[in-house]
Image (cartoon, rainbow, N blue to C red):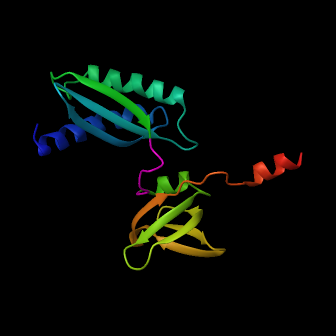
Amino acid sequence: MSSARQDATRDRIEEALVGPLSEQGLDVEAVEVTPAGKRRVLRVAVDKDGGVTLDDVADATRAVSEVLDASDVMGEMPYTLEVTSRGVDRPLTLPRHWRRNADRLVKVTPVDGEPVTGRITTSDETSVTLDVDGSPRVLSYAEVAKAHVQIEFNRKTDKSDKSEDA
């Protein structure tokens, strides 16, 4: 299958899934169709405010299957369906990604300037405020070339601090 044809198939699938999944409170974050021998693998990544549960993934899988069964978008070739949550390694590209990662540590590479690492304190539809070593730094999304959440192990939060005192 040509790359342009794969892109068109992926776009058609995503278009067909947005409505049914948004009814479940889920956003379609990524759709990938990749060849795997005589089959194809269709991966659909979903997300929502508060995070995705296993029940959400199961419900989304049923909804995606129903949409695909009712359409010809995947054609006659057999495929394997994988529905998953958005991985922590995915780039922050939309305002909702920043909102959903409030209080997380992120590494931002600006369009101009040196990379900066800071904690997301607030975000809106046009910009994000990071706490960089105790100082606020506001970046408009247009200034961001790329951004990723940084993995933190054993981070103490207000909740864990309070539970230790009890």
For the point 83% across and 50% down, the residue is 162
Q: Using the image as rendered, state which of residue 94 and residue 108 is in the foreground.
A: 108
Q: Using the image as rendered, state which of residue 50 and residue 164 is in the foreground.
A: 164
Which quadrant of the structure image shows residue 34? Answer: top left
Residue 140's x, y, as percent?
46, 71
Left or right side of 132 for 59: left
Residue 36's x, y, as percent?
21, 30
As drawn, the residue found furthest toward the bottom would be 113
Q: Which residues are magenta?
A: 86-93
Q: In this view of the protein, can residue 18 be seen by the observer?
A: yes
For the point 42% across and 51% down, the residue is 90
Does 108 appear in magenta? no
Q: Using the image as rendered, state which of residue 135 and residue 9 is in the foreground.
A: 135
> Height in image: 109 above or below 70?
below
Magenta-drawn stretch, dominant element (helix, strand or loop)? loop
**Dividing the image into 4 quarters, which one contains the N terminus?**
top left
As drawn, the residue found furthest toward the left would be 2
